[in-house]
Image (cartoon, rainbow, N blue to C red):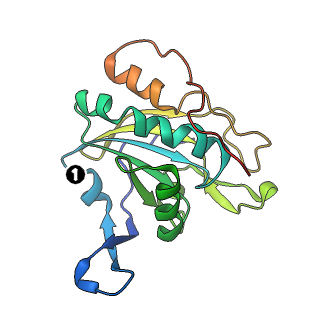
Amino acid sequence: MAVIEKVPSVVFKTRVRDESVGGPNPFRWQDLTTDDIFKGKKVVVFSLPGAFTPTCSSNHLPRYEALYEEFKAQGVDSIVCVSVNDAFVMFQWGKQVGADKVFLLPDGNGEFSRKMGMLVEKGNLGFGERSWRYSMLVNDGTIEKMFVEPGLEDNCPTDPFECSDADTMLAFLKGTSPAGVSAPSREFVG
């Protein structure tokens, strides 16, 4: 895998609430650029294979959500969860999981994941192309640290979750040794 030093330039297709839209569904499309998300900010990003999937829903997202204030205390401006899902799926998943602090960023076409070198084929599960699981610390667009799960490959028969977790990233920020992945905080059924 080539080492990437800066986050790639991408336009994300997002949905935002806008009361001026009116009606029962007051949302509109809004493009967000890489600069909108990262310029002048310290951002923790974690990327995962998919909304509504077991590890992503029971542990990965909920743990970042639970530790949000601890990340803020370390000078982090925002926490962003990237997934190759559309804006509608990301919105409904956030509601289902109860995520209101972590920003759920849809990478609907997989462009960001591809430019990061993290887009993998998961046809063995019927997922198509998805992001490999990883996390990174980004400071003003520059990637300062990445934790990439082992075994990066197309159609990986397992879903490694050993180092992109919230506790490992928080330990890095604090300059301490990680204690390992915490137990899931939510039950997954499905």
Q: 173 and 59: which one is in front? A: 59
Instruction: Give the percent coordinates (x, y) of residue 119.
Output: 60, 54
Q: Is residue 12 left or right of residue 157?
A: left
Whether residue 115 is visible to the viewer of this picture, yes or no, is: no
Q: Which residue is pictured at 51% across the width and 63% down the height?
A: 92
Q: Is residue 79 left or right of residue 53?
A: left
Residue 81, above or below 170? below
Q: Which residue is pictured at 22% across the width and 83% down the height?
A: 20
Corner quadrant of residue 75: top left
Secondary structure at badge 1 equals loop
Q: Which residue is pictured at 24% across the width and 78% down the height?
A: 19
Corner quadrant of residue 72: top left
Residue 84, above or below 15? above
Q: 86 and 187: which one is in front? A: 187
Instruction: Give the percent coordinates (x, y) of residue 135.
Output: 47, 38
Corner quadrant of residue 187: top right
Residue identifier under label 1:
39
